[in-house]
Image (spheres, rainbow, N blue to C red):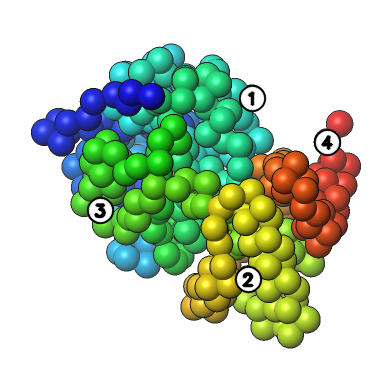
Amino acid sequence: MRLPAYSSAVQRRYAIIGSGALGGFYGARLQRAGCEVHFLLHSDYEHVRKHGLRCDSKDGDFHLPHVHAYQHARDLPPCDVVIVALKTTHNHLLAELLPPTGAVLTLQNGLGNEEAIAAVTGPERVLGGVAFLCSHKVGPGHIRHLDYGQVTLGEFSTSVVTERLRQIGADFERAGIPVRLEPDLRMVRWRKLVWNIPFNGLSVILDASTDALLRHTATRALIVDLMREVVHGANACGARLTDADIEQMMQYSDRMTPYKPSMKLDFEAGRPLEVEAIFGEPLRRAQRAGVTLPRIETLYRQLFFLDARRRP
């Protein structure tokens, strides 16, 4: 499959679809580094249009008094790279939100997002990535960055590190965002689930932040057991993970600033939970590969119940 040509001589224009704790943070960092960035906003639109974006960060606070803010996707100008940072519970809106041109980089949680975007844009425009980031919104246009921030990026339709991937990675690096480029996007996605499945799920079910879950011997053991199931499912699906990935995620977590994962924050705010992307889709893929993941399935059913009973 032929991918679009990409030039390092051209300054890339970015669009951010979903300008919350993740998209707002990375978009603001890219703009501060000199990139032209266009933000699609919903509830924060009027505030950001008038007052800009503010980021309180462990790497240094900053304020962007003027940003390109839009309330409707149709008003976005043509952009070279569209970063999708929506919650996966809004993926049914992708056909309305994605512009007709530009590479589309999804930094969403879970599995199946590249496929959902490719159904709208075609696979050759799609890139995927995961962010290891501790941040949350504390008010309109106001993001608090607590810890980490690195991203891992890969192509969806090919297993090579392309020139466009290198150039997008270079823009992130200039913005002070550590970047890793990987040829195997499937492995990248499953590796992030090694962290996301235990910490997002248990934080909701047990009403606990990351430090509390790690501190207690019973929950710490359960975290490791869940991580082992993720590795088992990943390997059944062709993503090569090992116990070293578990050890690395535990080390990251032990060094992490005490943190409420995104699913915990969504649950407390009464927002829909990303149950299907983070739990349901990995389970279905593992089952198609002939593998059962009983601990993860238990979490999935509990979260499905908690999420469903709050909806009409």
Dot 1 or dot 2: first in sequence order is 1
User: Which mark, by number, is residue 92?
Assistant: 1
Dot 1 or dot 3: first in sequence order is 1
Question: Which mark lies nearer to you, 4 or 2?
Answer: 2
Question: Which mark lies nearer to you, 1 or 4?
Answer: 1
Structural crowding at the residue carrying mark 4, measured as other residues with C-alpha within 10 Å and reported as few (<14), some (14–19) or many (≥20): few
User: Which mark, by number, is residue 311?
Assistant: 4
Which residue occupies 79% across, 67% down? 206
> Is 174 displayed left or right of 267 in the figure?
left
Which residue occupies 85% across, 53% down? 302
Residue type at the position of mark 3? Glu
| Position of residue 299 measured from the top left corner of the image (x, y, whole percent) | 80, 57
User: Which mark, by number, is residue 173?
Assistant: 3
Tell me the distance, in whole angstroms, between the alpha carbons under discs 4 and 2: 27 Å
Q: Is residue 89 visible?
A: yes
Residue type at the position of mark 2? Thr
User: Which mark, by number, is residue 210?
Assistant: 2
